[in-house]
Amino acid sequence: MILGILLSGRGSNFASIAENVLTGKLPCEIGCVISNVAAAPGLERARQWGLNAYFLDSKGKERAAFDAEVTQKLRSHAVDYVCLAGYMRLLSPEFVSAFPNRILNIHPSLLPAFPGLHSQRQALEYGVRYSGCTVHFVDAGLDTGPIILQVVVPVLPDDDEESLSARILREEHRIYSEAIRLIAEGRVEVEGRCVRIRSGK
Ligand code: GRF
């Protein structure tokens, strides 16, 4: 199974996936890493690892035209699954339908709670006792696609955005690779908006 990674920044989720791939813990390859931000630390890391790493400039391009460029690059590396890893762009409907149920995202809340940006801040402001993270397939909506895995993380009395984000991030790193592994093992089926995970033998 060949992965294509899209990122815009730090890239810690990408790095944890890549470490698992490069050490043989995930039965996948990384076909390419693409960033819409030239100076994204995640892109630099991809280069250091010797992966196919590309900056694609979206400036002055229509969303669909830019996404077509990204699609072409992913196809040129025979990518089976696209992993969004802090990719700060909305996807065009054309892009989503080019990879039906083959785009994964990690989101730092228990969806459908707190979609969009600053989910950890939203959780603190709402006053929830528990938040967490979600790996889901991407559909045409914002953080609305079928849910693959979720983990609950407690919100502690003294938490600020930074401490809660750090606690959630540790779990993000764990479940993103876990979801990829389940897919690579052929154990994930999508039925409507529900995901069924078959037990491993
Ligand atoms: C993570 O919190 C992820 O859940 C969200 O964007 C952040 C990306 O962090 N989608 P990183 O770039 O993977 O470190």
Image (spheres, helix red, strand yellow):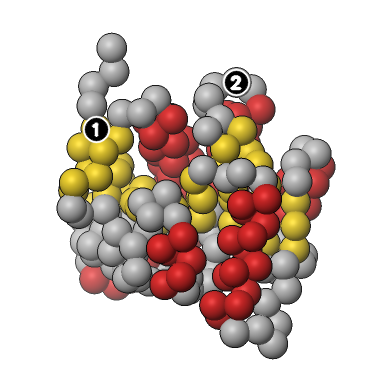
Instruction: Give the farthest residue toward the top.
Output: 201
Residue occupied by mark 1: 197
Q: Is residue 14 left or right of residue 52?
A: left
**Label 2 beta carbon less than 8 Å to ligand 1:** no
Q: Who comes first in sequence, dot 1 or dot 2?
A: 2
* 151 vs 1, nearest the viewer: 1
94 over 50 or under it: above or below: below
51 over 162 or under it: above or below: above
Amino acid residing under circle 2: Gly
Q: Are marks 1 and 2 in contact (CB under 8 Å)?
A: no
User: Which image quadrant is residue 55 in?
Assistant: bottom right
Q: Residue at x 58, y 45 (%)?
A: 79
**Label 1 beta carbon less than 8 Å to ligand 1:** no
Crowd around label 2: few <14 · some 14–19 · many ≥20 (10 Å): few
Q: Is residue 55 left or right of residue 16?
A: right
**Residue 159 percent across, percent down from the top left:** 37, 58
130 over 40 or under it: above or below: above
* 182 vs 40, nearest the viewer: 182
148 over 63 or under it: above or below: above
Residue occupied by mark 2: 24
Amino acid residing under circle 1: Ile
Q: Secondary structure at mark 1?
A: strand
**Residue 21 percent across, percent down from the top left:** 60, 29
**Residue 117 percent across, percent down from the top left:** 42, 72
Q: Secondary structure at mark 2?
A: loop
**Residue 115 percent across, percent down from the top left:** 32, 68
